[in-house]
Amino acid sequence: MPHRNRAAASAQATCATWLIIVTACGISDPGRAEPVGCLAAYADIKDSMTARFADAGNDAALIVRVDGKTVCRLFVGAYTPETRVATASAAKWLTAATVLTLVDQGAVRLNSKTADFFPTAPAATAGITLTQLLSHTSGLLWFSRCMGRRDDTLQECAQSILESDQQFEPGTQFFYAGPPFTVAGAMAERATGTKWETIFRLKIGDPLAMSHTSYGDSPNPALSEGEMVSNADDYARFAQMILDGGVYAGRRLLSDAAIVEMRRNRTAGLPVASSPIAGTPYGLGVWLEALDAAGNGTVLSSPGVGGFVPIVDFNRRMVVVLTVQDEKLWPAINAMLAHVRAVADRER
């Protein structure tokens, strides 16, 4: 009997249903569609979460889905299924996906230029494309004081960013930065005549029932970090949609072409001026932790500095969302993620 089948048989014999699992383990989460805990074959993931976070007095949440099925859903410390936490840079993935829905409908194009929507942009920034904005190759400055400032609107902030100095010619280097995402979002607003939060809710948030996810109530949301909050369950549904080629619960949110464009290595051959993850290529709004022979991402991630880590692994057909709000815990986070991958490999 193949190992995968032995594991499945063992899981069925130990706990025939999720209800039996959570009853036997003394863990449950009334009122949610999915219980809290791990399938029997993945029980050592729960032990690892306890040892690395709960026993150390840290709060954390973990969702692991394999082949479309939740194999672990865990909350330790003060975290509950309702806990909303700062996503930090994990916001970039959601922003890029939202913009790509507008590419699908033809409201914008990946080769649309800033001047197409900001005709008064200076010549130095007028030719920046949407692709360059979402791949950190635009040459725009790494930071702008207007980002998230409530006295401004997204449109005003984007105009200010475009009028600022450039670091390099568009498309010639990679520099991880936040302001390009503000400009991309402002282009989306102008293309649709709709405010950003409404675009996100209509295109991504509501179809995925992401009721705990928000960019905040500012007229000038920081689309790359800032006030955006989410939780493990919400982001796991988004990640599952990406893994399933843009489809969730039978509804298509993104085209196959959009997912392909997201996974395409946009930094191949470019000098790296600044990167928080040295040696890792980038797609559209997402890091490419592994590439196939054609140079397309097979493991995608968008980690936030505080410890909000979403991963889509096409090789393992796996989604992982680990949320921890303490940047000092990165060694434990990385060890936990390595353990999840090892258990997934064992069960295949």
Image (cartoon, rainbow, N blue to C red):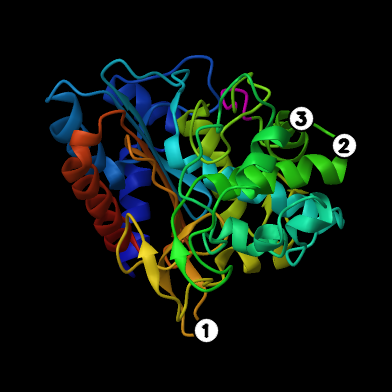
Q: Is residue 313 above or below residue 328?
A: below
Which secondary structure dominates the residues rendered in magenta?
Answer: loop
Q: In this view, does 175 lie above or below 18?
A: below
Q: Which residue is drawn at 38% across and 65% down?
A: 273
Q: Earlier in the sequence, mark 1 or mark 3?
A: 3
Stretch of the chain drawn in magenta: 210-214
The amino acid at mark 3 is Thr
Instruction: Give the left or right position of residue 93, taking residue 125 as reference.
Output: left
Q: Earlier in the sequence, mark 1 or mark 2?
A: 2
Disc 2: CA contacts within 10 A as few (<14), some (14-19) or many (>=20): few
User: For mark 1, what is the residue?
Assistant: 294
- Report helix, strand or loop for mark 2: loop
The image quarter containing residue 242 is: bottom right
Residue 281: x, y in percent?
A: 42, 68
Instruction: Give the left or right position of residue 206, taking residue 176 as reference.
Output: right
- Asked if the residue under mark 3 is in contact with the one under mark 1, i.e. CB atoms within 8 Å, the reply is no
Q: Which residue is drawn at 63% across and 21% down?
A: 218
Q: Which of marks 2 and 3 is nearer the N terminus?
A: 2
Residue 193: which numbered mark, if any? 2
Cα distance, mark 1 to mark 3?
Answer: 36 Å
Front position in the image: 304 or 67: 304
- Report helix, strand or loop for mark 1: loop
User: For mark 3, what is the residue?
Assistant: 198
Q: Is residue 271 above or below residue 212?
A: below
